[in-house]
């Protein structure tokens, strides 16, 4: 069996390794157009100047021809078959300070910024068990 045949066979197999996540997502329709660019910009709550910059870039992209690379053979890219935006739907409000974080963090040595009123971006958690082994974890969230 050739490498191409092996890869095609693997790509067509049902996933069998057991890991999967079922997320509720916010996904735009496939394809790329000015309407999709506007929709993505709206979802990301971008300012008007950034939307105009993206639309200008999209319009320029539509005038471009795909380069022909030497000694590389591949089929045409279906740009209208690609999903350009998908994000998990929020499950609720994120914690605003350490007091709102899971009580499991109580008693741990937490290192973070100086102001307790700022939104949490990164929290370094250090802990030590009875035998003296240490563990650290960086817990992050986007604001």
Image: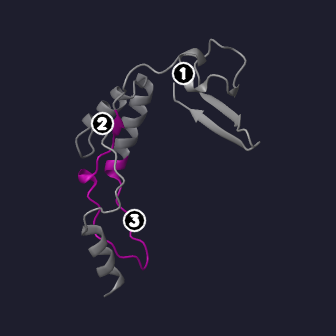
Q: SS of the residue at dot 3? A: loop
Return the residue nearer the eye: 127 or 63: 127
Tell me if 88 is positioned left or right of 111 in this view: left
Residue annotated with mark 2: 25
Question: x, y (%) of residue 16?
Answer: 30, 63
Q: Does label 1 or label 3 sit earlier along the sequence?
A: 3
Q: Quadrant of residue 124?
A: top right
Question: x, y (%) of residue 114?
Answer: 73, 18
1 and 3 marks in contact (CB < 8 Å): no
**Can you say which quadrant of the picture contains the N terminus?**
bottom left
Q: SS of the residue at dot 2? A: strand
Question: At x 34% / y 50%, what residue is drawn?
Answer: 20
Above-or-below relation of 123 to 2:
above
2 and 3 marks in contact (CB < 8 Å): no
Query: Was residue 62 drawn as part of the magenta stretch in this picture?
Result: yes
Question: At x 56% / y 26%, what residue is drawn?
Answer: 104
Q: Quadrant of residue 111?
A: top right
Q: SS of the residue at dot 1? A: loop
Q: CA distance from mark 2 to mark 3?
A: 34 Å
Tell me if 31 is positioned left or right of 86 in this view: left
Residue annotated with mark 3: 67
Residue annotated with mark 1: 101
Question: At x 40% / y 36%, what residue is drawn?
Answer: 54
Span colored in magenta: 61-88
Question: x, y (%) of residue 50?
Answer: 44, 29
| 10 Å crowding of disc 3: few (<14), some (14-19), many (20+) | few
């Amino acid at each position: 069996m050739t490498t191409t045949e092996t890869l095609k066979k693997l790509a067509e197999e049902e996933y069998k390794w057991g890991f999967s996540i079922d997320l509720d997502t916010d996904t735009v329709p496939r394809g790329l157009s000015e309407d999709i660019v506007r929709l993505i910009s709206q979802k990301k709550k971008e300012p008007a100047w950034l939307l105009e910059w993206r639309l200008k870039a999209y319009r320029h992209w539509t005038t471009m021809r795909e380069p022909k690379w030497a000694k590389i053979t591949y089929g045409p890219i279906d740009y209208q078959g690609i999903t350009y935006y998908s994000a998990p739907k929020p499950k609720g409000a994120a914690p605003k300070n350490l007091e709102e974080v899971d009580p499991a963090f109580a008693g741990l040595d937490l290192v973070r910024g100086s102001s307790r009123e700022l939104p949490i971006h990164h929290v370094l958690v250090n802990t030590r068990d009875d035998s003296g082994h240490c563990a650290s974890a960086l817990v992050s969230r986007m604001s």
